[in-house]
Amino acid sequence: MDDQPANLRAVSTLLSRHGYDVTTAGNGEEALALATAQVPDLLLLDMMMPGMDGFDLLAQLRRTPGLDAPPTIFLTAAQDRGMLLRAFDAGAVDYVTKPFIPEELLARVAAHVGLKLARDRLERVARQRQELVNLVAHDLKNPLGSVLFASDVLRSGGCRPERVSRYLEIIHDSAADALGYIRRYLETQARSAAPRRSRNACTRLQEVLDWLLQRYEPQLESRGQRMRIQAPATPSRVAIDGLVLRQVVENLVSNAMKYAPGSEIELSVRSGAPGFWQLLVEDRGPGIPALRQQQLFKPFVRLSEEDPADGLSSGLGLSLAKHILADYGANLWYEDREGGGARFVVELPVAADSAVAD
């Protein structure tokens, strides 16, 4: 920003020739509008100008909610020490005196843009790592919960002898699932990318339904609940990794157990849009209020104000499930159920013929 067109042209031409994408403004109001519409990696501001000067502009940017003011270099003809100290107090990271030496300006711009981009990369890595921690912590809850449930039953001595092998199988399979999740996350980190959709991924929905019934029937019985499975009328194969789909639907079943106690949980399959199957998870609980539905798939939003998981509910499950499904071209949404209750719909692309192996 500079009120002298000749200065604007000189700086813009110099930086553009060295590969920078430059946007110019002739006054403070114009610069403020541009900087808030698209935050730049660096600001070059004239210190003293008629109207809104560099100090005013920087102060306004720092007061703007949700906006991180970019690093700022002041261009100034002033050599006054007090003025320069005021610039740094205002948030400037550097200054260049006018008339400027091109090499000096380029060096300072390159240094501060480089620092800004490096800081952005570090923040992005930190966010990704935190997201991974959240993902692992959340998705390990269900298999570890199954291990704890089955082991508690066996320790209590209240298990009929003929059912001991089933509870041992639950413990073994749940531990294997937990290790499978960890292995997949570690592989994801090694690739430095999100899990990639496999062209050959293929899962039979009937197998997923059978697995859910096998895994959760004992827990549901202990709560006075039951799961009812409505088998698909025709073979239904979808283009998603089986472990991933189990992970998603397991979250939905776990939520129904927590938030609809005493309700029967129904799982069924129906045709969706052309080229898609829909897997439905339904209950006859209280459902979800309309206002909360608008926030349902945002991180850290719980299904109700109460936490029946006794502090273990993070509010991440639905957000993570929707994110995971999107990587496979699938989707997840909520519907109010006729007659009361909740319905979650998982829409999944039909597996290509080349992925089907009978």
Image (tube, rainbow, N blue to C red):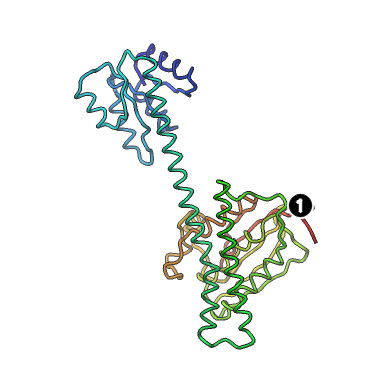
Residue at 56% x, 57% y is 321
Instruction: Report x, y in % for residue 349.
Output: 70, 53
Amino acid type of the residue tagged 1 in the rendering: Ala
Query: How many C-alpha atoms fall within 10 Å of the one at disc 1: few (<14), some, or many (≥20)?
Result: some
Vertical order, 137 against 76 (above or below): below
Q: Residue furthest top?
A: 6
Q: Nearer the viewer, residue 102 or 330?
A: 102
Vertical order, 2 against 232 (above or below): above
- As helix, strand or loop, the secondary structure at mark 1 comes to loop
Q: Which residue is mark 1?
A: 352
Question: Split into 4 quadrants, where in the image is the N terminus?
Answer: top left
Q: Nearer the viewer, residue 305 or 135?
A: 135
Q: Nearer the viewer, residue 355 or 220?
A: 355
Residue at 65% x, 68% y is 267
Instruction: Report x, y in % for residue 18.
Output: 48, 19
Instruction: Report x, y in % for residue 355.
Output: 76, 54
